[in-house]
Amino acid sequence: MYNKDPVQVGPPAHLEGWFTEATTVPSPQYTDTQNKRLLEEHTPRFVGQESQIEIPALHCEVQEQITPLRTPTAREHWRIVSETTETAVLPSKRSGRIRTLVAIPCFNEEIAIGSVVLTARLYADEVLVIDDGCTDSTAKVAREAGATVISHGRRMGKGRGIKNALRYAIEHGYDCLVFMDGDGQHNPREIPLLTEPILADTADIVIGFRTFGQMPLYRRLGRAVLDLATSNGSSITDSQCGFRALNRKTMESMLDTLRKDDFSTESEMLRIAQEKHLRVGETPINCKYGDDLHTSTKNPLSHGIEVLGSIFWLTIERKPLLCIGLPGLVAIFAGVFVLLQFFWDFSATGLVPVELGMLASLFLIPGTIALILGLALALIARMQE
């Protein structure tokens, strides 16, 4: 069964010093000469000698990560990777490439703020709650849920809370800032929908838009009016949605430019984005409305009037010549036309047309005042720049 040829075997490395002389062991004897030759060719005869047998590389199919908010990758986009490829790290809900802050301005939202903060923390590095003079336990619940809380001490307006959040994000080095409501109207699980274009650098500001089908009738009418007043020629679908994401460039632009402290801040942000030529993107979101969900701390009618008034004054402040000077100039031309008609009738009849004289005065006097005021405001705005 065995041949007589001994094979010299050295002591194992871990047993070095145990043997004082070489040990001989017989090698197996094979009747099949071909198998024997193959074994002798590839099998190391001495301990520590490497084998020449090559092990084929293992290949496997890896599908890209699937999130509940995205459609699974199609079969044709699967890719083949080898065993030597570096280990792939699946991205978590919080992207490692950008630091994200979720800011929630709120007033008396103790019922919903806890769950909103807990869910938002899954998609952000930090959650900031701006307590705008809450008289309930909103701040306490938010802290217990893990949020950082900034308290105004009194009602100062949503716009002031947004500016404080912008300042906090810039001072703490965040790359992306997400604004959302704390009343449960917005779903924190949809945060990646807004941050994805920021991460891909395809937009500077991303706004969630609500379909009219999920909004009550009175809110549809109010939104349509405010969208028309805010659009300023742009194609923004939902100008009043508070669920939006900003990159670092937009944060810096907004902090030094926002002026209003009320609910018109969303409209003012869009106007600034247009003036600064920022890239504005939109993504569909879902919103909760219903009698069992308190989604607003202000009456919709007074809210709409306040926003319209703020938009009007913002437009005047930013474009005084267009909003004041130009109408004044048109009124002056109309007054001059009526005044010429006044002199024509007087020369033809010899009678003083009192009605035409009063009408000419109504055009000329306010028109002149408006033109002078528009020029003065435009000069002041130019000096401030």
Image (cartoon, rainbow, N blue to C red):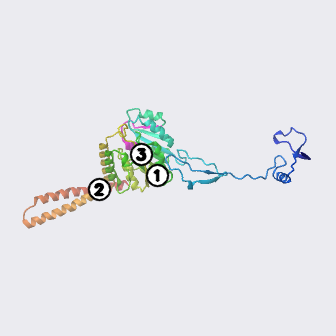
> Above or below — where is 183 with respect to 349?
above
Query: How busy is the neighbourhood of tag 3: few (under 14 within 10 Å), some, or many (20 plus)?
Result: some
At 45% from the left and 49% from the top, the residue drawn is 246
Which amino acid type is marked by label 2? Cys
Tell me, yes or no, whether the highlighted magenta stretch contains residue 110.
no
Q: Which mark is residue 249?
A: 1
- Determine contact: label 2, label 1, CB under 8 Å: no
At 51% from the left and 53% from the top, the residue drawn is 200
Reading the image, the residue beneath label 3 is 286
Classify mark 1: helix, strand or loop: helix
Residue 375 vs residue 116, the one in the foreground: 116
Mark 3 and mark 2: Cα distance apart in space: 37 Å
Residue 265 visible, this angle: no
Residue 246 visible, this angle: yes
Residue 116 vs residue 8, the one in the foreground: 8
Residue 39 vs residue 261, the one in the foreground: 39
Residue 149's quadrant in the figure? Answer: top left
- Determine contact: label 3, label 2, CB under 8 Å: no
Reading the image, the residue beneath label 2 is 323
Which amino acid type is marked by label 1? Lys
Query: How busy is the neighbourhood of tag 2: few (under 14 within 10 Å), some, or many (20 plus)?
Result: some
Which residue range is magenta in the image?
147-162
Task: Give the position of the N terminus as an image quadrant.
Answer: top right
Residue 321's quadrant in the figure? Answer: bottom left
At 7% from the left and 65% from the top, the residue drawn is 349
Which amino acid type is marked by label 3? Asn
Query: How busy is the neighbourhood of tag 1: few (under 14 within 10 Å), some, or many (20 plus)?
Result: some
**Taking 125 as reference, is 376 left or right?**
left
Residue 50 is situated, as x and y percent measured from the top left of the image, at 79, 50
Badge nearest the viewer, 3 or 2: 3
